[in-house]
Amino acid sequence: MADSASSALPDDGSRCPSPEDVILLRRWSSMQAALRRLTQQTLDDIEEKTGQAGSSFQVLWYLLSAPGQVAPMKQLAATLGFTTAGTTKVADRLCDAGLIERRPQPGDRRVTLAALTPQGRETAIAASLVLAGALRERVVGPLGPDRFSAIVDAFGAIDPLARAT
């Protein structure tokens, strides 16, 4: 995508983005689109090689990296950005597949926990290794480890969640 401002924007005296703003907005759109495509490709790799849909992998990875490989369903939904209904739907599929189990939290039966089963742990590890390989091939390879680290650091500096803590 070119960085030059387009004459397709109205020039009728109305307030329009400046040419510099147009360049900024186009770069932002380009970066977002590239990241979405890359994310989809890596999730497609995981599904192709493990049979786990992207949403299922996100839940499995989160639980694999959570303390005790257990998390409250509400925390899972909030962290992954899923709706409560969406989280329930994914959790139902994973429970039916024997990859996670739901259980009440000791001391507070109002809280439902999601926990990896042994089979879920193995599936999460296998899918994580697929993702690591895809990232090495599609991201670290073309960028190099130093540029990749610099990009990760740069995104960390602008992450609203990281800045809030």
Image: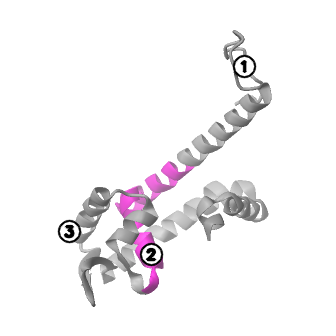
Query: x, y percentage for residue 159?
Result: 63, 59
| Few, some or many residues within 10 Å of mark 2 (<14, 14–19, 20+) | some
Check residue 58 for magenta coloring: yes
What residue is drawn where x is 76% and y is 30%?
3
| Few, some or many residues within 10 Å of mark 3 (<14, 14–19, 20+) | few
Could you say which is closer to the camera, residue 9 or residue 115?
Answer: 9
Residue pointed to by mark 1: 6
Residue type indicated by callout 2:
Ile
Q: CA distance from mark 3 to mark 2?
A: 19 Å
| Figure quadrant of residue 79 | bottom left
Residue type indicated by callout 1:
Ser
Quadrant showing the N terminus? top right
Q: Residue furthest left?
A: 96
Check residue 106 for magenta coloring: no
Element at label 1: loop
Query: x, y percentage for residue 106?
Result: 27, 90
Closer to the chain start, of discs 3 and 2, is 3
Residue 137 shown left or right of residue 85 in the figure: right
| Figure quadrant of residue 26 | top right
- In the rendered structure, find residue 125 and report the number of the disc placed on it: 2
Report if the CB atoms under discs 1 and 2 are less than 8 Å apart.
no
Q: Residue furthest bottom?
A: 107
Residue type indicated by callout 3:
Asp
| Region of the chain picked out in magenta, as a range | 38-67
Q: What coloring was used for the rendering?
A: one colour
